[in-house]
Image (tube, rainbow, N blue to C red):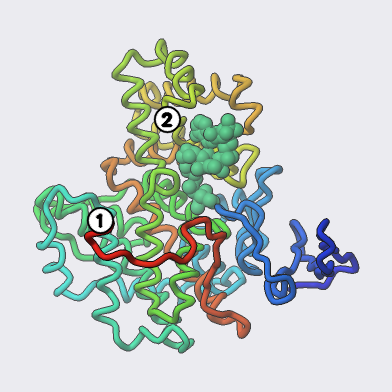
Amino acid sequence: MMTPSDVKATLAFSDGSPSMELPLYKGSIGPDVIDIRKLYAQTGKFTYDPGFLSTASCNSTITYIDGDKGELLYRGYPIEQLAVNCDYLETCYLLLYGELPNQSQKDEFNHRVMRHTMVNEQMQFFLRGFRRDAHPMAVMTGLVGAMSAFYHDSTDINNPEHREIAAIRLIAKMPTLVAMAYKYTIGQPYIYPKNDLSYAGNFMRMMFATPCEEYKPNDVLVRAMDRIFTLHADHEQNASTSTVRLCGSSGTNPFAAIAAGVACLWGPAHGGANEACLNMLGDIQQNGGVAKIGEFIKQVKDKNSGVKLMGFGHRVYKNYDPRAKLMRETCHEVLGELGLQDDPLFKLAMELEKIALEDEYFVARKLYPNVDFYSGIVQRAIGIPVPLFTAIFALARTVGWIAQLNEMIGDPEYKIGRPRQLFVGASSRDVKPIGQR
Ligand code: SDX
């Protein structure tokens, strides 16, 4: 609920242009906003905020982040409590409908999702069009967008029933599509979903089973996978969520809007960071391991090197990302279960984290480990190939993207998003005949 604040902001100009009063609004928690919607009409001026460091694009009830405290709430529930007390499908229910389900609501939702896990058999022909060594995120961008070619009964984003069934289909089919993208790269047959398994257990089976022998999911690894899904489910107005909102604001269908989110998440500054982080750890390991961390940190501090400490830093968190703490716990559990406590990459990551957290360069810039710092190590230990990490991030974030998209479309005030610019290019000039150019 946006509550008008008693405080007003006055915008005055030193050149004597008429000043303007701007209303402020308060949220339930977090920073107030200055409502600038009438600014251009009244002053002929735009605000300027590339990267949106000081811009609220919407009002939302879904996810709240306090970057200074390192706090993350899904519909008011702390991520630490959800990760321990709930599973991913309960979290999906919470994000979509605003409340945690009771037992019968949970059973009904699970039944609905697990009855939509198969994809149309035609989907296999899309996969055949890709090279076997295509990056899984290239494949996923294609497959998710292609879903709008199959489900014509759920492409009208303004129809609540369409939005509801599209949400269930996307949540249900992402694991099947990610597993198919993986099997295609290794030349193994696709494994069909098994609906009597848990959501995460079904995904692990589709990933690692073969028709030649039954696959028994390991409960510790399944719980770790489910926790990875929960920790990545939503995260306020991050780059890919903002992409989904902007894309969906044109009225395009939900599958196309989610495909845009997949494409944005792929970037190494965003969801691609877990893959980049593991590659970074691998490079350090190859170049001498722990003994070479100092040299690597020196490179990171040298702006000209272009080297970043992947898995560190965050636009919002200026404290420890609460998800990273939970992911580190999961790391210990998984490596313990698999007898990999001495995993060299995990030891390297812990040493790198220790050194970075004590180094003035990182402390001054409030650079802490984020969710991607440990998620790659956990996924690698589980047997997930590195290029698939971001596809799993996309699988988990699909529910957040859908919840945010539906919140926007459900807001009667929403309009198509259309930012403006500060133009610094050539003013009007005449075309010269080619002989005079
Ligand atoms: C995700 O938005 C979300 O919520 C995203 C996400 C989600 O769940 O949706 O949380 C998922 O994307 C997590 C972030 C994953 N990305 C990485 O781990 C890649 C490495 N991190 C950086 O690229 C960077 O930290 C960003 C992109 C995450 C944040 O970029 P900002 O906001 O532009 O960073 P900043 O302005 O706060 O940086 C402040 C300073 C700068 O140096 P100075 O100009 O002050 O000298 O810190 C430097 C930056 O150059 N810096 C880093 C660094 N991150 C920032 N230096 C070295 N290594 C880093 N990782």
Judged from this view, the residue extending furthest toward the front is 436
- Measured along the vertical axis of the image, is residue 354 above or below residue 415? above
Q: Are marks 2 and 1 in contact (CB under 8 Å)?
A: no
Name the residue tied to disc 2. 306
Report if residue 326 is visible in the image.
no
- Please state which of the two labelled residues, at mark 2 or mark 1, is closer to the viewer: 2
Image quarter of residue 94: bottom right
Which of the pair 289/115 is nearer the observer? 289
> SS class of the residue under badge 1?
helix
- Measured along the vertical axis of the image, is residue 319 above or below residue 100? above
Report if residue 387 is visible in the image.
yes
Which of the pair 343/305 is nearer the observer? 305
Q: CA distance from mark 2 to mark 1?
A: 25 Å
Where residue 258 is drawn, which disc sits there? none
Where is residue 405? Give x, y as percent. Answer: 50, 72
Quadrant location, the N terminus = bottom right
Name the residue tied to disc 1. 138
Image quarter of residue 256: bottom left
Horizontal side, residue 300 vs residue 358: left or right: left
Q: Residue at x 37, y 65 (%)?
A: 260
Which of the pair 38/190 is nearer the observer? 38
- Measured along the vertical axis of the image, is residue 115 above or below residue 83? below
Q: Residue at x 42, y 75 (%)?
A: 167
Q: Residue at x 28, y 54 (%)?
A: 137
Which of the pair 11/36 is nearer the observer? 11
Judged from this view, the residue extending furthest toward the right is 6
Name the amino acid, label 2.
Answer: Gly
Q: Residue at x 40, y 76 (%)?
A: 254
Crowding at dot 1, Cα within 10 Å, few <14 / some 14-19 / many 20+, comes out as some
Q: Earlier in the sequence, mark 2 or mark 1?
A: 1
Name the amino acid, label 1.
Answer: Ala
